[in-house]
Amino acid sequence: MKILKNKIFRILLWVTTISSFGDSLYALAVTLSVYQMSGSIAGVAGMWMIRVLVRIPCQFVSGVIIDRFNRKKISIYVYLLSAALMLTFALTDGKYMMLAYILIFILQGTSDVDNMAQMALMPELIDKEELTDANNIFSVMGTIIMFVGPGVGGVLYTIFGTGILYLIDAVTFIFAAGLMCAVPYRYEEHEIEKAQFKLFAFAKEGIAEVKKMPIIKNIMMITVFFCILGRFYEIDKIFVADKVLNIGAEGIVYFTYAMAIGSLLAPIATKLFARLGWRDTTKYSFLSILLAVSFMLWGNASVFLLSIVANIMIGFFQTSNSIMVSTIFQSTIERGVFGRVMAFRQIVTVLGAAVGIIMAPVLVQYIGVGGSMFFIGILAVTFSMVLVIKIKIQKSELTVRL
């Protein structure tokens, strides 16, 4: 691919790969720590709720920050702060529930700021026609990390415990900060003139921009359902592994591997869709329908092999869907309002996730994991089909005008 010859892209790829490896270790360590300390999925749900509490205000502030300040420096500072926080985790070895929740709270906030800064940097440093290829490569590398991370993490956890996983994550953040310094990013000074952090005014601007883009608005609506399904999955998976499939809490590593296999195949889907000549929004709609079906299948799988197949499908369609969303947003939204729109989008996803976190323990108790997945999955399929119909109507109206 031509994009691989781009030095700036290669640096960004290494930054993301190294930090993602550390994050995969952190995700495994913190999930096991919280589950073991609490002894139930309620504790895991609490962990996700902590993340939601910080994301609601943080997403608005993140949008202000990346639109007003140097995006490269933002990422560097975030990496260094995250390294310090991870060292705190390592020193306490994840033994104190309250401290763990506080650190999770702060780390989620720094992660949101960095993710938005990185996404905003992409269209500035990479040509628009190469964005899909770039997102595909990021996806493949992320999937490779999904293979390597849990395996390495599982072995290290068995021998040394969670402390070593937090320590390695801290080191990866430091390396990522160093690499980010090498990115030749030209910062325009006028971006910070009269910068004011008007939280609600900024949110209102983001909503106003989204209203001008009906397709973006529809995608955000569908995203809500997948945020709910995603939280159901993250909260319920340790219960499914431990109590439904009887493979132990550590069995979530198998789920991660299965999803990684599916994610590795995702770029193939984007290439095949490209040959069909479909619009990106049409591709997104069909991928959304298939993703919803995959979640429903996983929730109702009581046999290990079927559960693994469902995880592979989730990984495949979720990654393909994510690639299309990134491409649509990066190619559609103007640079000057990117932070505002992305801030509003993140708030929408966070609210969806919050609903999922609140509903998950309750629905599992009354209708089970399968019933929960089926209920929300049907809604996701319905809204995705509505988007397909809207796209066809829009295309027909355009043809008539011409």
Image (cartoon, helix red, strand yellow):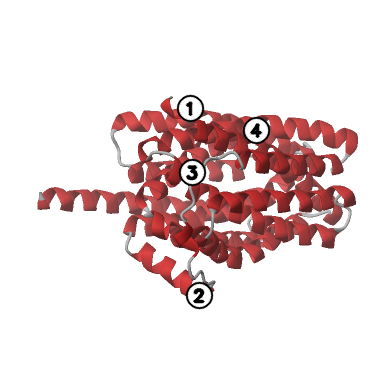
Q: Which amino acid does the dot numbered 4 rest on?
A: Ile
Q: Secondary structure at mark 1?
A: helix
Horizontally, residue 278 falls left or right of residue 296, namely left
Do callouts 2 and 3 mark residues in contact (Cβ within 8 Å)? no
Residue for badge 3? 322
Q: Which amino acid does the dot numbered 3 rest on?
A: Ser
For residue 145, the mark is 4
Where is the N terminus found, in terms of image quarters?
A: top left
| Mark 1 vs mark 2, CA separation in Å | 41 Å
Q: Secondary structure at mark 2?
A: helix
Q: Secondary structure at mark 4?
A: helix
Residue for badge 2? 200
Residue for badge 1? 4
Of residues 254 and 164, the one nearer the viewer is 164
| Mark 1 vs mark 4, CA separation in Å | 19 Å
Q: Which amino acid does the dot numbered 1 rest on?
A: Leu
Q: Which amino acid does the dot numbered 2 rest on?
A: Phe
